[in-house]
Image (cartoon, rainbow, N blue to C red):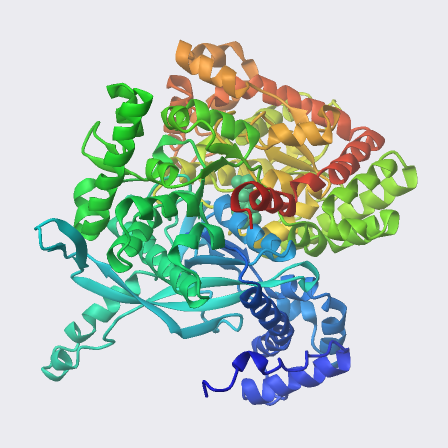
Amino acid sequence: MDTVSKADIPLPKPRAFEPEVLAAEIIEKLTYAIGKDTKVAKPHDWLTATILVVRERVIDKWMEATRAAYVANAKRVYYLSLEFLIGRLMRDAMSNLQMMDEIKEALASLGVDINVIAGLEPDAALGNGGLGRLAACFMESMATVNIPAYGYGIRYVHGLFRQQMAEGWQVELPENWLAHGNPWEFERRESSYEIGFGGGVETVNNSSGEDVRFVWKPSERVIATAFDTPVVGWRAERVNTLRLWSAQPIDPILLDAFNAGDHIGALRESNKAETLTRVLYPADATSAGQELRLRQEYFFCSASLQDILRRHVQHGNSLDTLPDKVAIQLNDTHPAVSVCELMRLLCDIHGMDFDAAWDITWRTFSYTNHTLLPEALESWPVPLFERLLPRHMQLVYAINAKILIEARRQKGMNDQEISKISLIDESGDRRVRMGNLAFIGSHSVNGVSALHTELMKETVFADLHKLYPTRINNKTNGITPRRWLMQCNPKLTALIREAIGDAFLDDAEKLTALDAFADDKAFQEKFAAVKRANKEQLANLVASRMGIRLDPSAMFDIQIKRIHEYKRQLLNIIETVALYDQMRSHPERDWAPRVKLFAGKAAPSYHNAKLIIKLANDVARVINNDPSVRGLLKVVFVPNYNVTLAETMVPAADLSEQISTAGMEASGTGNMKFALNGALTIGTLDGANVEMRDHVGEDNIVIFGMTAAEVGKLRAEGHNPRAVIERSRELSQALSAIATGVFSPDDRGRFGGLVDGLYNHDWFMVAADFDAYAKAQRQVDGIWANPTDWFGKTIRNTARMGWFSSDRTIRQYTNDIWRA
Ligand SMILES: *Cc1c(COP(=O)(O)O)cnc(C)c1O
C-alpha cells in the first residue's frame, strides 16, 4: 500500500444540493444507515437521517481543508478549553452551507416539518456560560476567517445539568445529550494516547553521576480517545475540527478478578477511568478545587499536547520550529498545566535540555484571563499536585527557580514582589498558582475587554506586569453574527438585507449602512413588526411551557445569564418590587406595561444564587396574581437557560439588563447579542459595556451607577450601606417587604439573610447603586413612551454592533498573538 502515493487519490465528487437529491438521500440514510422504513420512522430518525445528509456536505469541505492545510504546512492554531458551549449544530451547519431552504423543501416533500425535527436536536452544553460560549463562537469564526485551527476539550457524557423548578427552587437533573447517539462526531480510535497519574520520578545519571534525565513512572494510566466534530465556517469557507477527548480504561475488564467471582472489582478500574470524563463541573466564576477537576485538566492537556507534537513531527517538522508552526491558546487557567506538560514532553521524552525547552514553551503558548474574582483564581494544594503529577511539580519548581532568580538579579525585585510573582503561594497552605503559571509560560496574556485588561494590570497581575511590561494585551470578546443574528433572527436578517443588501452577511461592520434608516418611519415600522413577531414567539414558548400569558405589546425587559451576586439579578428583582409598590400607590400614572423576564442557572453549591432564583419566583407569583397591578407588570423566570433558549429570548428583547457591579464582569457577551438584535441596553460601565457605549453612542444606551474606580474607592474608604438604605424610601420599603415575608408567607424569614447581607456589607453595591438604577429605569420608560425615539435608538444599536463580531476578535488574535 505504501508504494501508492495516497495523496494522489482524488477526493470523491462533492455532494449535490438540489432538494430532490437531498430528499432521496434522506430516505437512503433512513433505510441503510438507520435501518428504518419510512412508514415506522420516528421524528428522531428523520432528524438523524437529515443530519447525516447535511454532514456529508460538511465532510466534502472538511477533507478539502485538511488536505490544503497538510500541503501548506501552515501555522496551526490550537484552542484549549475545558468548555465548549456549542448548543445545537444542525441549523448552524445548514445555514453556513447555505442549504437551509433546500433541506426545508426536501423535508417538506417527505411530509416532515423541519422545525419539528430541529427542535429535537439536543443542546450540547459542554460548558457553563460565557467562557464556554466564547470558545464556541471562536471555533466558528476561526473557520470563517480561514484559520487552520483545532479546538481541544473534553467529551463530557453529561453536560451542564438540566434546571427544573420545584415550588420556585432550582432542582438539578442530569443532562444526557448523547442519549440518542451523536451523528456529528467521529470516534478516532487511532488517535489514542496514554495519560498517567501518580507514581514517582526516577532519575537517570550519566557517567559523571549528574542527573541527566527524569523518567516519570505513573501508578495509574488511562487512555484518551479522540472524538472529532467538524465546525463549518460561514459559506463553508473552511471546516475545522473540534477534538474532544474521552477517557477509556486500558483494560476494560480485569478478567482474573471476574473469573475469581469479583464481578464488581473486575470493573472498578474501568469505572474509575470513565469517571474522568463523565461530568462537567457545574460551577461558573468559582474554582472547583477538587482532585477530579485537576485530573480532568491534566487529562485533556496531556492528550492534546501529545496529539499536537505528533502532528508537528509527522509533517516532518523539527521540535525547534514548534513556535513557528504551532500557536496554543489557553482559555483561562484550566489548561495551564499544559505549560508543564509540554516541558515534560520536550525534556523527558524528546531529550531536550531545560533552557531550550523553556524557550520553545513560552513562545508557543498564549493565555486569556477571564476573571479577576479571587474565588475564581485556580490554585492547587502542593501536596495534591505533587501526588497526582510528581514530575510536573518538579518542573513547577524548576521554572519558578529560573524566573525568580532572573527577577531578583536582573530586575532587582524585593521579597514582597518576588512572593507575588512566585508560582507557589506561600501565604497559607502552600498552593500552585495556575494564573502565574499560565502568565509566565506564555508570550501573550490577554484580557477580554479594554476595562478588564487595564484592571488586570493594576490588580491580579500587577507584579508580573512590572516584570513583563509588554506581555499583557487586550482582545475584546465578540459573538458570531451567524448564530446570533442570521440564525436566531431570520426575520431581522431578511429586513436588513432588504434595506442595505447582503454585504453585512460577510462583514458585520457593514451593518453601519443601516444607520441611514434609523429615523426612517417606514423602516421603523418594519423593524417594530419584526420585534413584535419575535416577542410573540417567546410569548408562545412561555405560554406552552409555563402556562403564563404575556402581552407582546408590553416592554420585554430581559436578564438572562448565570445567576451570580456580581451580576446583580438581586438589584433587578428589588427594583421590580419597588416598581410594584409604585404602581399600586400611583395607579393614576401612565405606567409602561412591562414583562420582567429572567433565566439562568445557579451553581448547585451556591446558596445565595439559589435563593435569588427562589426570590424571583416568589416575587413573580405575588405580582402576577395581584389584580391591582392590572396586568401592567409581569415577572417570569424561564427554567433551564441554555444556548437554545437564548436563541429565542435574545431576538425578543426590548431591554437588555447588563447591570453587574462595575469592575467585576470581565467582558460579557450576552450584552452584545441583545444589542445586535435591536434591544436597548440598561447597564453599568463594566466589561464590554464600556466599548458598546463607545460604538453605539451614549445617546443609544442607558448607563447608570458607579464606575469601577468609584467602587474601588468606596470599598477602600468603607461603604455604609445601612445609611444608604435608610436614605432611600423606595429601597427601604422594597427591602422591608422582602425581609418581612410579603413574598414568602409560607416562610417569612426565608429572605432575611439575603437582605441582612445588603444592610451589613453590600459587597456587590446593590444598595449603593439602587437609586441610580431606579432612575435609569424611569428614563427607559420615557424613551419607550416615544416609539420614534425608541426605534431610532434600537436600530442604531443593530447598525453599530458589527464591530463586536467574533470575526474581528479572531483577526486580532491572529495578527497580534498567533501570527498564523
Ligand atoms: C452568551 C451566553 C452566556 C454569557 O452571557 P453573559 O450575559 O455574558 O453572562 C451564557 N450562557 C449562554 C447560554 C449564552 O448563550
Q: Position of residue 642 (x, y in %)?
A: 53, 52
Q: Position of residue 19 (x, y in %)?
A: 76, 78
Ligand 1 picture quarter: top right
Q: Which of these two is toward me, 500 or 488?
A: 500
Q: Is residue 4 left or right of residue 415?
A: right
Number of marks in picture: 0
556 over 820 or under it: above or below: above
Q: Position of residue 695 (x, y in %)?
A: 70, 31
- Residue at image location 19% in from the left, 69% down from the top: 268
**On the image, which quarter does residue 796 sit in?**
top right
- Residue at image location 43% in from the left, 73% down from the top: 188
**On the image, which quarter does residue 366 sit in?**
top left
- Residue 78 visible in the snapshot: no
Q: Which of these two is toward me, 771 or 719?
A: 719
**On the image, which quarter does residue 816 sit in?**
top right
- Residue at image location 86% in from the left, 46% down from the top: 526
Q: Position of residue 510 (x, y in %)?
A: 78, 44
Q: Residue furthest front?
A: 208
- Residue 567 visible in the snapshot: yes
Q: Is residue 522 left or right of residue 796?
A: right
258 over 345 or under it: above or below: below
Q: Is residue 501 left or right of residue 153?
A: right
